[in-house]
Image: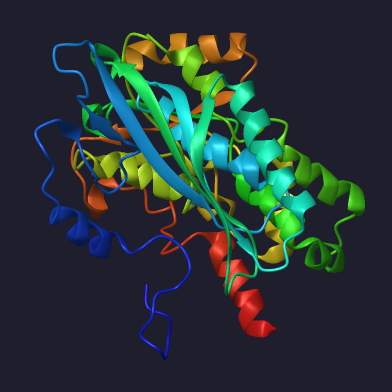
Amino acid sequence: MPKSGDGGLRAGKLPPDLLAGLLARLTPGPDVVIGGAVGLDAAVIDFAPGSDRYLLAKTDPITFATDRIGDYAIHVNANDIVCMGGRPRWFLATALLPEGTAEAAVRGVFDQLESACHAIDVSLVGGHTEVTVGLDRPLVIGCMLGTVVSAELLLPRNVRAGDDLLLTHGAAIEGTAVLAREAATALRAAGLTDTEIAAAAELLDAPGISVLPAARALKGLEGLHALHDPTEGGIATAIRETATATASGFDIEVTRVPVLPETAKVCAALELDPLGLLASGALLAAVDPGGTEAALARLTEAGIPAARIGRLTSAAGPASEDSALPTFERDELARYLEGRSDAG
């Protein structure tokens, strides 16, 4: 959305209408099974005609300053591959570093990338690293490649009216961890203790921002129609993206959406809404109601908390949307950081 006064764009994702218009201009080749689209997690390429496998390709940047930028880059990109039903295989990273970055810091980012790749059996196969003029923080842009058996490909367009919506863990793991690192001073001023801030920061490790364990637990489940990784715009935006994929509506029981205790404290302190906060680490699943009990049982067996938070309905529109579910023009984290910058 335009920033008041200058006609420019605010921090965060492009407005959906602008992005959709840009993507509509693309002309994919015959080997592109699924190209760019709003709300789609990765591209699908038929790289070996006649094979039963497709190539999945995803790119995502890490733009918020963080001491764990390498870990974020791997898991955020891998999440989108597994949400398509695939297996992450190869990773390339472009690291852009501010002038004056110490060699030790560069080695630290590389060590994180290498370690995170090893943890999920992904090969770090290349990329590009440079010191760039005009940056005030390091940026890592990742490209994750994976494969999927064609019959196991999961797409948002496969969701159906009546599907239950299940959510693992809750809102909002990544946003809470980032705020604990980026806004510790403000959180202390609002009354949070150092112990509470540390607990919020540790969400990056437990439960973590990877949805691989949850996706693997649900793999092959009869009635599983789609998976979605809530990121910018939080849980609320992810629900709307899932419904929009097939022009469906939704009926959400907002009080059933789990909010992590650390998230509730951080958001209350900074006057943010947990439902619109960066939410990597949660997994949204659209499941035929006949498979819901089995899905929840599988997740429980894997040690992953999950809840049914609502369902998809037959048609989109005000009459079929839960008015209690807020709409967010941009992520609450971006709104907070921009407001802090304007104030400073």
- The quarter of the picture where residue 33 lies is top left
Q: Where does the N terminus fall, quadrant-wise?
A: bottom left
Q: Residue at x 25, y 28 (%)?
A: 159
Q: Nearer the viewer, residue 284 or 290?
A: 284
- Image coordinates for residue 39, horizontal then vertical, percent: 32, 45
Q: Nearer the viewer, residue 83 or 314?
A: 83
- Image coordinates for residue 318, horizontal then vertical, percent: 25, 54
- The quarter of the picture where residue 286 lies is top left
Q: Where does the C terminus fall, quadrant-wise?
A: bottom right
Q: Along the horizontal axis of the image, is 14 left or right of 172?
A: left
**Furthest-bottom residue in this view:** 5
Q: Along the horizontal axis of the image, is 8 left or right of 103?
A: left
- Image coordinates for residue 342, horizontal then vertical, percent: 61, 83
Q: Is residue 327 above or below residue 170?
A: below
- The quarter of the picture where residue 7 lies is bottom left
Q: Residue at x 42, y 91 (%)?
A: 5
Q: Is residue 294 above or below residue 268?
A: above
Q: Residue at x 35, y 63 (%)?
A: 14
**Furthest-right residue in this view:** 194
- Image coordinates for residue 112, horizontal then vertical, percent: 68, 37
Count of number-bearing discs: 0
Q: Nearer the viewer, residue 188 or 150?
A: 150
- Image coloring type: rainbow
| Residue 263 appears anywhere in the view | no
Q: Is residue 1 above or below residue 149?
A: below
